[in-house]
């Protein structure tokens, strides 16, 4: 494990960043305090932490990065910030950074263009995102207590098996796109998360898998009540066939069995050119949506 204990304390106060879009990889400095004074309206990237593996120069062993006991960084990313927030921020990594102020809240409500946010191994309890945020990659720590996403429709899938991001040919860390909640699928401990709002979702059937896993784990544990709201999401991988659709022998169809379930539609016994339009009009035929993970 490589930690900040082996490095001198770094206090970073940044001035005059109005026209800068990237401050570089600050994880290598093992900073202890960070503050942006003034406007940073052009900033697109903040690399506070690191979630890849690092090679120990002495042993060759691959180790995790850790920066412990740092002060809560100050960079005015709230939509109410007097400096105008960070409207162009697209990438932020604060993984494996432990704040002295535990259970801190990070407000990124000015960052509508944020695409990639990762904070595994940190001790943030909540991250606030802008409505309609452009996130396609979201990795949150095990201590997160509240997750609220509104119209984050570019977040397409649920990650159930974690892999450390790896360096691409440009030397930048790349992570699998999707939503990852640290610890939820790795063990059966009750997640700290007690507020889960997903209002409008692009994850399709993965929204159901997330809720089911959360419920299955939490129901067996003594925990605080859960506050869950999930609206305008697609709960099923099956789509009702509409009257303008023609039968396609290459498509998997299912028929309502009359007992609140679906059975596979058998072409040789169930399909008839005259019967098909009637079944469709009655809402009896469904097809499997192969675009859903």
Image: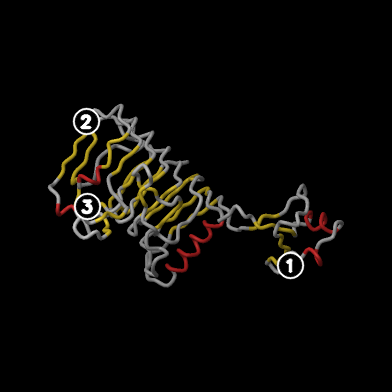
- State yes or no: discs 2 and 1 in contact (Cβ < 8 Å): no
Q: Check disc 1: other Cα within 10 Å, few if <14, some if 14-19, many if 20+.
A: few
Q: Quadrant of the C terminus?
A: bottom right
Vertically, is 149 above or below 222?
above
Q: Check disc 2 and report the residue beneath it.
A: 15
**Residue 245 image offset from top left, x and y in percent:** 76, 49
Q: Check disc 3: other Cα within 10 Å, few if <14, some if 14-19, many if 20+.
A: many
**Residue 11 image offset from top left, x and y in percent:** 16, 41
Q: Check disc 2: other Cα within 10 Å, few if <14, some if 14-19, many if 20+.
A: few
Number of the label disc, if any, that sits on residue 258: 1
Q: Nearer the viewer, residue 43 or 77?
A: 43
Vertically, is 146 above or below 219?
above
Q: Nearer the viewer, mark 1 or mark 3?
A: 3
**Residue 278 image offset from top left, x and y in percent:** 82, 56
Nearest to N terminus: mark 3 or mark 2: 2
Which residue sits at x=67%, y=55%? 239
Q: Relative to residue 75, is residue 229 drawn left or right?
A: right
Q: Nearer the viewer, residue 204 or 197?
A: 204
Question: How far is disc 2 from disc 1 in space, using C-alphas?
Answer: 68 Å
Vertically, is 134 above or below 242?
above
Q: Residue furthest right?
A: 274
Figure colour scheme: secondary structure
Q: Check disc 3 and report the residue beneath it.
A: 67
Q: Quadrant of residue 10?
A: top left
SS category of the residue bearing label 1:
loop
Q: Residue furthest left?
A: 8
């Amino acid at each position: 494990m490589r930690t900040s204990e082996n490095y001198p304390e770094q206090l970073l106060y940044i001035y005059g960043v109005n026209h800068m879009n990237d401050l570089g990889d600050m994880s290598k400095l093992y900073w202890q305090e960070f503050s942006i004074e003034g406007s940073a309206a052009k900033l697109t990237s903040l690399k506070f932490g690191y979630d890849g593996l690092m090679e120990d120069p002495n042993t060759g062993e691959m180790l995790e990065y850790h920066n412990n006991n740092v002060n809560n960084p100050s960079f005015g990313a709230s939509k109410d910030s007097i400096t105008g927030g960070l409207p162009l921020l697209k990438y932020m990594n604060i993984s494996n950074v432990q704040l002295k102020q535990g259970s801190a809240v990070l407000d990124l409500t000015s960052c509508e263009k944020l695409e990639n946010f990762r904070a595994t191994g940190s001790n943030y309890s909540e991250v606030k995102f802008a409505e309609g945020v452009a996130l396609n990659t979201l990795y949150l720590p095990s201590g997160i207590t509240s997750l609220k996403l509104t119209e984050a429709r570019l977040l397409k899938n649920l990650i159930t098996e974690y892999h450390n991001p790896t360096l691409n040919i440009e030397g930048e860390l790349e992570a699998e796109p999707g939503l990852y909640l640290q610890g939820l699928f790795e063990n059966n401990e009750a997640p700290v998360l007690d507020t889960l709002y997903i209002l409008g979702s692009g994850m399709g059937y993965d929204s159901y898998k997330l809720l089911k896993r959360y419920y299955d784990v939490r129901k067996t544990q003594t925990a605080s009540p859960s506050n869950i709201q999930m609206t305008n999401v697609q709960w099923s991988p099956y789509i009702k066939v509409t009257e303008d659709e023609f039968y396609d022998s290459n498509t998997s169809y299912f028929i309502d069995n009359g007992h609140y379930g679906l059975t596979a539609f058998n072409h040789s016994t169930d399909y008839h050119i005259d019967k098909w339009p009637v079944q469709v009009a009655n809402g009896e035929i469904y097809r499997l949506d192969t675009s859903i993970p």
